Image (spheres, grey):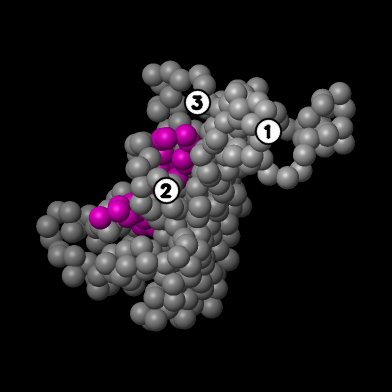
């Protein structure tokens, strides 16, 4: 499996002319394989898990003249030698610093983190388990955060960005988070659980019992962050590793969504939509109907049963 992943992520990008699996020399059928059709060699047939289905949405909102949000979503299933490795990488970033600074910061942060993770992903495989795997995957996500931070300092000085990234690898997921974008779990019982902590002044005051949640929602400094990429050194990202839930939905979003749409309304929209993509579009509409004062970004991932 490790060699297979290396071939996918190798830097050369060139097929070996002598490789019978290259496109020019392949005589393999082009139709999808149906495990229910044909019975001559049933011992060679293996059913693999479907990759994660996701939906994405982004809106400038109704009161901004530029978009400081950025997102990345990728889902795939790597298969080799009867091994299935479901992979999903999802990232949401909300830039800060005003026009140019904010939109550039979130853009370079997304590019840098995705590039860092994907270029190093081949070293983490499910056919070579060891007791340090959890720690190693967290190190992979932390390295992605550092790459995003450095990219902002070099390419968008003066800007900053939140960043919430989710990597699903086999049956394990790792979240890397800084700022006040969020990761949610929506379970089959229709409960919404915030998996991340807002690194904001009002959240800190709320945790200290100095203000209530209602006061936090209208606090004049509710957008002030004490942790963000591109700001003070060293960065202090939140890292969470846990098994992938058996069912339900995962959601990443910027504060343009969760700050305008209640958890109950988000749950209703997600669980009644016919697909994650429809749910994403309806969430954008709900945030804009509520006033749309900020950019809005959302990624919804459906967890297969």
Q: Residues within 10 Å of mark 1 (few under 14, many from 20)?
A: few
Earlier residue among tags 3 and 1: 1
Percent position of residue 284, x then y: 45, 72
Residue 209 screen position, x and y as percent: 12, 57
- Rendered image: mark on residue 126: 3
The residue indicated by pointer 1 is: 8
Task: Kindly tell me whether residue 280 is visible in this rendering.
Answer: no
Closer to the chain start, of discs 1 and 2, is 1
> Does residue 193 appear anywhere in the picture?
yes
The residue lying furthest to the left in this view is 209
* Rendered location of residue 137, percent (x, y): 45, 31
Does the magenta run of residues contain 301?
no
Q: Residues within 10 Å of mark 3 (few under 14, many from 20)?
A: some
User: The N terminus appears in which quarter of the rendering?
Assistant: top right
- The residues tagged by marks 2 and 3 sit, at their Cα atoms, a distance apart of 19 Å
* Vertical relation: 176 (above or below) 224: above
Q: Is label 3 in a helix, a strand or a loop?
A: loop
Give the residue at mark 2.
303
User: In front: mark 2 or mark 3?
Assistant: 2
Image point 13% across, 60% down: which residue? 210
**What residue appears at the point 22 percent right and 67 percent down from the top-left corner?**
216
Mark 1 vs mark 2: give the one in front.
Answer: 2
Residue sitting at 41 percent across and 21 percent down?
A: 132
The CA distance from mark 3 to mark 1 is 16 Å
Q: Nearer the viewer, residue 258 or 171?
A: 171
- Position of 66 with respect to 298 (left or right) is right
């Amino acid at each position: 499996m490790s060699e297979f992943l290396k071939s996918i992520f190798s830097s050369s990008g060139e097929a070996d002319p002598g490789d019978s699996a290259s496109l020019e020399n392949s005589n393999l059928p082009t139709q999808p394989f149906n495990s229910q059709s044909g019975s001559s060699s049933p011992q060679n047939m293996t059913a693999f898990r479907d990759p994660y289905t996701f939906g994405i949405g982004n809106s400038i909102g109704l009161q901004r003249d530029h978009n400081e949000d950025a997102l990345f979503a990728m889902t795939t299933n790597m298969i080799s030698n009867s091994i299935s490795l479901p992979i999903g990488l999802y990232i949401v970033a909300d830039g800060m610093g005003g026009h140019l600074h904010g939109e550039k910061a979130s853009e370079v942060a997304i590019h840098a983190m995705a590039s860092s993770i994907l270029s190093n992903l081949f070293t983490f495989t499910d056919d070579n388990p060891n007791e340090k795997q959890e720690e190693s995957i967290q190190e992979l996500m932390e390295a992605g955060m550092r790459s995003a931070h450095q990219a902002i300092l070099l390419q968008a000085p003066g800007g900053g960005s939140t960043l919430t990234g989710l990597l699903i690898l086999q049956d394990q997921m790792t979240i890397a988070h800084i700022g006040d974008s969020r990761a949610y779990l929506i379970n089959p019982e229709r409960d919404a659980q915030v998996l991340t902590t807002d690194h904001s002044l009002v959240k800190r005051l709320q945790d200290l019992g100095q203000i209530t949640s209602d006061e936090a929602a209208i606090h004049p400094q509710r957008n002030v962050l004490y942790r963000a990429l591109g700001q003070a050194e060293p960065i202090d990202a939140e890292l969470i590793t846990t098994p992938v839930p058996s069912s339900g939905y995962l959601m990443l979003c910027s504060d343009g969504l969760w700050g305008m749409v209640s958890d109950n309304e988000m749950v209703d929209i997600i669980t009644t939509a016919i697909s994650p993509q429809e749910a994403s579009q309806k969430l954008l509409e709900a945030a804009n109907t509520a006033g749309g004062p900020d950019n809005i970004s959302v990624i919804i991932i459906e967890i297969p049963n």
